[in-house]
Image (cartoon, rainbow, N blue to C red):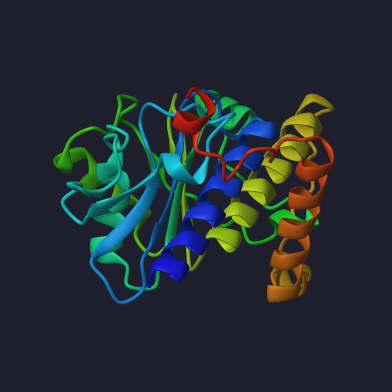
Amino acid sequence: MDAQVHELKLLVTKAVRMLERIELLDNNGHVSVRIPGADRFLINSRKASRASLTVHDIVMCDMEGRLVEGDSEPPSEFHIHTEIYRRRADVGSVIHNHPHYQTVLGIADIPLKPVFGVGAFVRDVPMFEDSSLINTRELGEQVAEKLGKASSVLLRHHGTVVASENVQSAFTISVFLEENAKKQYDAALLGPNMRVLEGDNLERTRSSNWQPSIIQKLWTYHQEKAEKQGALNGIEDDKEDDHR
């Protein structure tokens, strides 16, 4: 179990660092993963910088958000994670992002549409209207209910929530949604005759662009690019040791 938990902490840390590098996270936002076979989850701590997060900044909580392991509290919006995990046995990872283009489209009241190959899985992304911090159980329940069986919900004026089976697939959905939103935004600037994916073409594109091999390929690409740029340096360092 200790080795498994460490590997999950490492995945969460990498995902946070990589999402921050591509500006889907900023000084806020969080990634969690459910610990298999236990009513526990791991999440980046509230106080830790997303840019310099290490595995020592990942805390373990129960499904009430109470700290089980770690020396810092979870983010105040942990209710997003706990309430989705309660309702969705199929979900193993939840990410709360602050992406630019999806948020802008939401502000403009423009629904997300499948316009790009890797965004072909976009369909009827629900909109949550309360833009405040999701820092109560009641708000967490409302977000989870709005998400339903979907993989993403847009929080108007705020950001997005992504839920999927594991960290790598939740990361991939996060990246693909924003890539699709960028294309939709740019195409909207060129005129009213936007062509969206639909019908058989949409279904073929959707099935061909959402495969385990593509999820792993995207994760590996971003991990190797982050490593090359030094964005994953010190990921397993103990910051307290560095100051002794």
Residue plotted at (43% across, 30% down):
156
Q: Is residue 177 left or right of residue 83?
A: right
Q: Nearer the viewer, residue 25 or 101?
A: 25
Position of 17 relative to 156 (above/below): below
Could you say where residue 189 lies in the image, as x and y percent from the top left? 79, 25
Could you say where residue 77 lies in the image, as x and y percent from the top left? 30, 36
Q: Is residue 152 left or right of residue 148?
A: right
- Position of the N terminus, as image quadrant, is bottom left
Residue 145 visible in the shown view? no
Q: Is residue 166 left or right of residue 173?
A: left
Residue 1 visible in the shown view? yes
Residue plotted at (68% across, 50% down):
176
Residue plotted at (44% across, 24% down):
157
Could you say where residue 112 lies in the image, as x and y percent from the top left? 59, 43
Could you say where residue 74 lies in the image, as x and y percent from the top left? 30, 38
Position of 244 relative to 85 (above/below): above
Residue plotted at (70% across, 59% down):
120
Q: Nearer the viewer, residue 200 or 232?
A: 232
Number of marks drawn: 0
Q: Is residue 72 left or right of residue 2?
A: left
Q: Which residue is the extreme one toward the front?
A: 244
Position of 183 relative to 174 (above/below): above
Kindly indicate the quadrant of the structure image that contains residue 231: top right
